[in-house]
């Protein structure tokens, strides 16, 4: 049943469909793990160690896609000036950064097993990925450095777009480089044997679902907290938005209906 | 120690993998544990946040109960009065307006 906000506008709920998404994620992860360990054959050269790729490569792909998505959402924010797009961009980049750390750790574990070193500085794929991670590591400090929420959102969006454009450029540059020490998986799925390709695709889907679920959890939690704070202010008789210095975007609307769209001032 | 013949049988091409199972196993386990730990840490953070929201909601509930108590004792304060002011207004607004500033 649809409920309405005090102004009669439709409420926005980030938690909608969260349960279904969570169940799908758990199922996909279980199927992916089952395929990895009981269905996919051992790779001839790397043997059992190759199983790391079913977690490492999907993590890397989703991370890079997440960074690009963050840029696209930031474009939408600059186009519409709707705070929700900045909020989504922030959460997607935040989650991508967590996935990036997972990618670096799993990649290092594989490198140690395969090459005998945790990190190889002469490998362009590793170094370029680290550059991207370090670039995005400045996103949160950038946001925190700007106190004015409007300016913070605008600058963060510009950063997200610029950095998001850098990601595919960087990817192409690495592909064009001459060193081919790093195993190529993306773009060569058709060369994989059927069971391996299926396992990889299911793992990729599971990782994408995990990313989407965690982003939705984050959005819902932050939104719920913003709503509780807004309610507290209203109960205290304080109509001013009120904001502590934070890197996270502040949702100033209880129903998160953008002020401009609703034609009224923010609560 | 796993015999080479067993490992060779496990490999689809019959070749012995670069790293034997007992050596590669710890790296593979490590990689999957990293993913598991990342998700687990995230769930733990979410649990802490949820408990904060729950605590804040508890505070808000006690605030509204306190406001209700004061509104009931105020002269002339009543449900009819609040409804007459704005029948469509949500309950929280009524409470806030009824409560002394």
Image: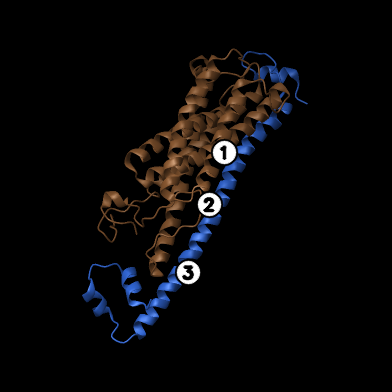
Chain colours: A brown, B blue
Residue B46 - label: 2
Mark 2 surroundings: few (<14), some (14-19) or many (≥20) residues within 10 A: some
Please report the residue visible at 58 percent of the width from the left and 28 percent of the height from the top. Answer: A129
**Quadrant of image for the N terminus of chain B:** top right
Relative image position of residue B15 (x, y in whole percent): 67, 13
Instruction: Name the chain under label 3.
Output: B
**Cα separation between marks 1 and 2:** 21 Å
In the image, what residue occupies the spot 39% across and 49% down? Answer: A14
Nearest the eye: A176 or A218: A176
- As displayed, is residue B21 above or below residue A25? above
Q: Contact, CB < 8 Å: mark 1 with mark 3?
A: no
Residue A124 visible, this angle: yes
- The correct choice, above or below, for A213 with respect to B67 in the image is above
x and y percentages locating residue A212 in the rendered image: 45, 39
Residue B58 image point, x, y percent? 47, 68
Q: Quadrant of the C terminus of chain B?
A: bottom left
Position of residue A145 in the picture relative to residue A11 (left or right)? right
Cα distance between the residues tagged 2 and 3: 20 Å
- Residue that label 3 marks: B59
**Compared to A66, does B67 lie above or below?**
below
The dot on residue A137 is 1
């Amino acid at each position: 049943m649809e409920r309405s906000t005090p102004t009669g506008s439709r409420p926005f709920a980030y938690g909608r469909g969260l349960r279904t998404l969570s169940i799908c994620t758990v199922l996909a992860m279980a199927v992916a793990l089952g395929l990895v360990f009981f269905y996919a054959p051992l790779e001839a050269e790397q043997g059992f160690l190759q199983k790391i790729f079913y977690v490492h490569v999907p993590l890397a792909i989703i991370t890079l896609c997440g960074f690009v998505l963050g840029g696209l959402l930031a474009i939408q924010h600059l186009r519409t000036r709707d705070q929700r797009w900045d909020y989504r961009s922030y959460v997607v980049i935040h989650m991508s950064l967590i996935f990036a750390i997972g990618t670096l750790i799993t990649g290092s574990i594989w490198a140690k097993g395969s090459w005998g070193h945790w990190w190889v500085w002469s490998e362009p794929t590793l170094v370029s990925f680290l550059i991207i991670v370090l670039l995005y590591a400045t996103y949160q400090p950038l946001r925190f450095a700007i106190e004015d929420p409007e300016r913070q959102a605008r600058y963060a969006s510009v950063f997200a777009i610029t950095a998001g454009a850098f990601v595919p450029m960087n990817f192409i540059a690495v592909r064009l480089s001459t060193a081919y020490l790093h195993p190529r998986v993306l773009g060569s799925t058709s060369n994989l044997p059927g069971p391996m390709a299926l396992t990889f695709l299911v793992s990729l889907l599971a990782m994408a679902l995990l990313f989407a679920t965690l982003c939705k959890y984050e959005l819902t939690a932050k939104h719920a907290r913003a709503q509780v704070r807004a309610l507290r202010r209203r109960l205290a008789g304080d109509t001013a938005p009120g904001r502590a210095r934070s890197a996270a975007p502040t949702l100033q609307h209880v129903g998160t209906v953008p002020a401009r769209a609703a034609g009224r001032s923010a609560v | 120690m796993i015999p080479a013949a067993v490992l060779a049988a496990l490999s689809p091409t019959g070749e012995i993998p670069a790293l034997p199972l007992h050596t590669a196993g710890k790296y593979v386990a490590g990689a999957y544990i990293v993913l598991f730990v990342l998700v687990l840490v995230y769930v733990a953070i979410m649990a802490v946040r949820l408990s904060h929201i729950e605590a804040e909601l508890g505070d808000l509930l006690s605030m509204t109960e306190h406001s209700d108590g004061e509104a009931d004792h105020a002269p002339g304060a009543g449900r009819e009065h609040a409804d007459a002011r704005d029948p469509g207004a949500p309950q929280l607004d009524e409470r806030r307006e009824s409560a002394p500033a």
